[in-house]
Image (cartoon, grey):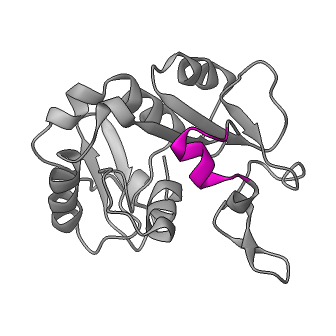
Amino acid sequence: MNCIGGVLAHDLGIRFNSPTVNLYMRAEDFIRFCENLPYYLSIEKMVPCTDPELVGERNYPVAYLGDLVLFLVHYASVEEADRKWQERKTRLRMDNLVILATDRDGMTEELKDRFEKLPYRKIMFTKQPDPVHPGCVYIPGCEAEESVGLLTKPVGWQGKRIIDQLDWVGFLNGTENR
């Protein structure tokens, strides 16, 4: 959904195997993407977005992938992002997929319900405990905010990040549930 997966892959020194590295999607688009992975992965090319309402004052490119809007935060051009998308989508292993999401960018209860139905290992980071959605992981310290915020932002004098509250290696290896 955003930069979390890329940051974790970088931290762990592993190859970027997800086409979504270095970009983000709004919640509705991300859930739709996850619900229809084979379709969206079959799309041959991103199309530059020139809609002033979507592009706004952004200093990075915005593109369409079918009906999805991709915010290409860490790319210089749509062409560069598309090249990386096409390369990385071939690395995706559907039998070993982990979906990472947050309660940011328009996440609603209905979208959380759809997230829960996804047939993949998944985590959604939330600012409040959510006993209704088992895939949600509460991140303490964000309660006063609109959402969990930037999970990769260092907090406190030790430089730990919000995402460091989770044993990532254990979770990815299946030895740590949350």
Q: Relative to 38, does residue 163 appear above or below in the rendering?
A: below
Nearest the eye: 97 or 42: 97
Residue under the image location 15 percent in, 61 percent down: 83
**Residue 172 covered by magenta stretch:** yes
Q: Nearer the viewer, residue 104 or 166?
A: 166
The quarter of the picture where the C terminus appears is: top right
Q: Relative to residue 170, is residue 39 drawn left or right? A: left
Q: Residue furthest front?
A: 175
In the displayed structure, would residue 122 be above or below residue 20? above
- From this viewpoint, which residue is outermost toward the bottom? 157
Figure check: 123 above or below 4: above
In the image, 150 versus 120, the foreground residue is: 120
Tell me if residue 146 is in the magenta stretch: no
Residue 94 coordinates in the image, percent (x, y): 30, 31
Q: Write the residue at 62% across / 35% down.
A: 107
Residue at point 33% right, 30% down?
Answer: 95
Number of marks in the rendered image = 0
**Residue 40 place in picture, x, y as percent:** 24, 33
Whether residue 135 sits left or right of residue 117 in the image: it is right
Tell me which segment is drawn in magenta. 166-176
Left or right relative to 55: residue 142: right
Instruction: Indicate left or right for 97 with 76 as reference.
Output: right
Q: Nearer the viewer, residue 89 or 47?
A: 89
Q: Quadrant of residue 130?
A: top right
